[in-house]
Amino acid sequence: MLGHIAVDRITGLKGIITAVADFLHSPQRIELSPEKLHEGAPVKGVWLDVPRLRIGKSKIKAPKFESTVTMGDKVTDNLPGSRVSRSGASRSSMAVSASRSPARR
């Protein structure tokens, strides 16, 4: 549903679904963000119940990503401000290399 165009059956508001919320005892709600600007500024999204919407085709095409890292590869975090552990390895390299450590018996 994310990225689809939807129209509110009551007000006629048309926009793109930018968020979805599920609740235990009420209908699913979505945030509908209008595509058009108002006086040159973006319009804030509106939360609406799904039953009052007419949901159309997807507006957003998700790009295809191919991973350059496979499980078990040692990687380093080159982002500025990244946290480094006491051992000198970044958290991301620890997470990937930890998955390769042998299981304890």
Image (spheres, rainbow, N blue to C red):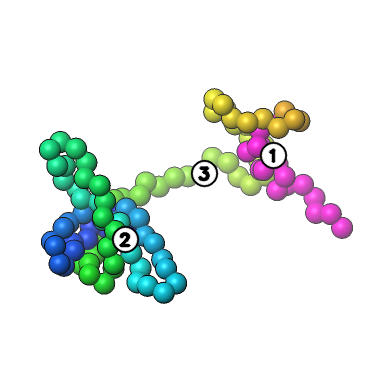
Q: Give the magenta-colored segment's residue range.
A: 89-105
In the picture as drawn, the residue positioned furthest to the front comes out as 25
First in sequence: mark 3 or mark 2?
2
Instruction: Indicate whether residue 93 is drawn in magenta.
Output: yes
The amino acid type of the residue labelled 1 equals Met
Q: Quadrant of residue 91?
A: top right
Helix, strand or loop under label 1: helix
Helix, strand or loop under label 2: strand
Asked if residue 81 lies left or right of residue 100, the reply is: left
In the picture as drawn, the residue positioned furthest to the bottom comes out as 25
Residue ID for mark 1: 94
Instruction: Indicate whether residue 40 is drawn in magenta.
Output: no
Q: Is residue 90 shown above or below 47? A: above
Q: Quadrant of residue 11?
A: bottom left
Q: Is residue 22 shown above or below 64? A: below
Q: Quadrant of the C terminus?
A: bottom right
Question: How many callouts does the rendering have?
Answer: 3
Please indicate, yes or no, whether residue 11 appears anywhere in the rendered image: yes
The amino acid type of the residue labelled 2 equals Ile
